[in-house]
Amino acid sequence: MNTYFDFNRTGLLIQRYFLERFRSELIYWSIMAIVFMFIRNNIAVIGGLIFIAGIFYAARFFREIHSRTNGINYFMIPATQVEKLTVSLLFTIVYFYGMMILAYIVGNLLGTLFTNLLANISFFSFDLRLFHSVDLKWTLFESKQYSNIFTGDLKYQAPYIALFMKYLLLTQSIFTLGGIYFKNNQAFKTILSVIVLLFAFSIISVVELKIFAGTTSVNANSAESVITMHGVFHTIMSAIFAYLVPVYLWIISYFRLTEKEV
């Protein structure tokens, strides 16, 4: 018997999740679809909703391990920590994002349909219409051009949905670890920890920038070199935070889950 990772045990863990949370999941995603009916064409609000909902979804995924009764039942499940963590990643990233897209599609279709139906209704004997017909728009799937913040040149063009997925990997990995580490108020404590870390990094960056500026003579060539260096540094750090940091946090989550089980 494979004592490290088994697809059959992983499938049973997924089945267990749906059996225990089917009703709550149905209510949750129904509410999301209703919300998307009203915000379907506002990409800023859509992005904020996905970000905030993802935070709380990931942070609360392991809430049962902090309960004395539920925690004992959870750790007695005949599955390895790798399998449990894999299932959590499947739900907090793949399943969550897929269901968000589905909720957006359903909400967008229903919202557009109801708006157009109401637009055909006139009140009293006057042709008074509180709603106007609208075309079906898929704002979440539209593409946007992103420019290099240092040179101003066009950097790349990507749909919003791909951009959200990129940042979702990082945020979900952070709050999955926070959900395992903190016993209560996981989301708020993780947010506070992130704010403290960002503040510390900001101070370090400012100090380094002052030291660098004080030891470097400023002219046209050096200014251009600094801009180029910052552009390369920004590209490298973006790739690290988007792809390597989540993997590192998943590894930490694995060991933290192992310690919690012991």
Image: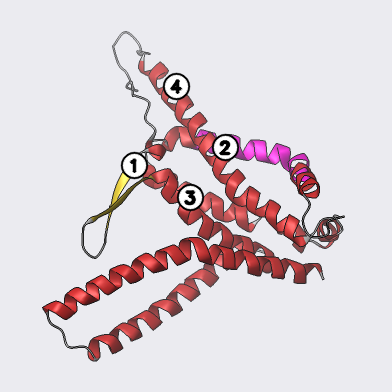
Q: Return the disc, 3 or 4, that comes first in the chain's sequence.
A: 4
Name the kind of residue labelled 2 in the image.
Answer: Ile
Characterize the local packing of mark 4: few (<14), some (14-19) or many (20 or more) Cα atoms within 10 angstroms: few
Instruction: State the extent of the magenta-drawn residues as a range.
Output: 16-35
Q: Is residue 112 visible?
A: yes
Cα–Cα span, label 3 and label 1? 14 Å
Which quarter of the rendering shows the C terminus? Answer: bottom right
Q: Does dot 2 land on a helix, a strand or a loop?
A: helix
**Residue beneath label 1, please?**
143
Q: What residue is disc 3 on?
A: 165
Does residue 73 lie above or below 50 as drawn? below
Q: CA distance from mark 1 to mark 4?
A: 26 Å
Q: Which label number is shown at residue 31?
A: 2
Q: Amino acid at mark 4?
A: Phe
Q: Which residue is mark 4?
A: 114
Q: Are marks 1 and 4 in contact (CB under 8 Å)?
A: no
**Is residue 20 highlighted in magenta?**
yes
**Mark nearer the N terminus (3 vs 1):** 1
Decide which of tag 2 and tag 4 comes sooner along the chain: 2
Q: Amino acid at mark 1?
A: Ser
**Image point (64%, 67%), residue name:** 251
Q: Position of residue 213 (x, y in %)?
A: 24, 86
- Of tags 1 and 4, the one toward the viewer is 1
* Mark 2 crowd level (few <14, some 14–19, many ≥20, 10 Å Cα): some
As helix, strand or loop, the secondary structure at mark 4 comes to helix
Q: Does the magenta run of residues contain 106?
A: no
Q: What residue is drawn where x is 73% and y is 60%?
A: 82
In depth, the one of 19 and 78 nearer the eye is 78
Placement of 33 over or under 203, stated as above or below: above
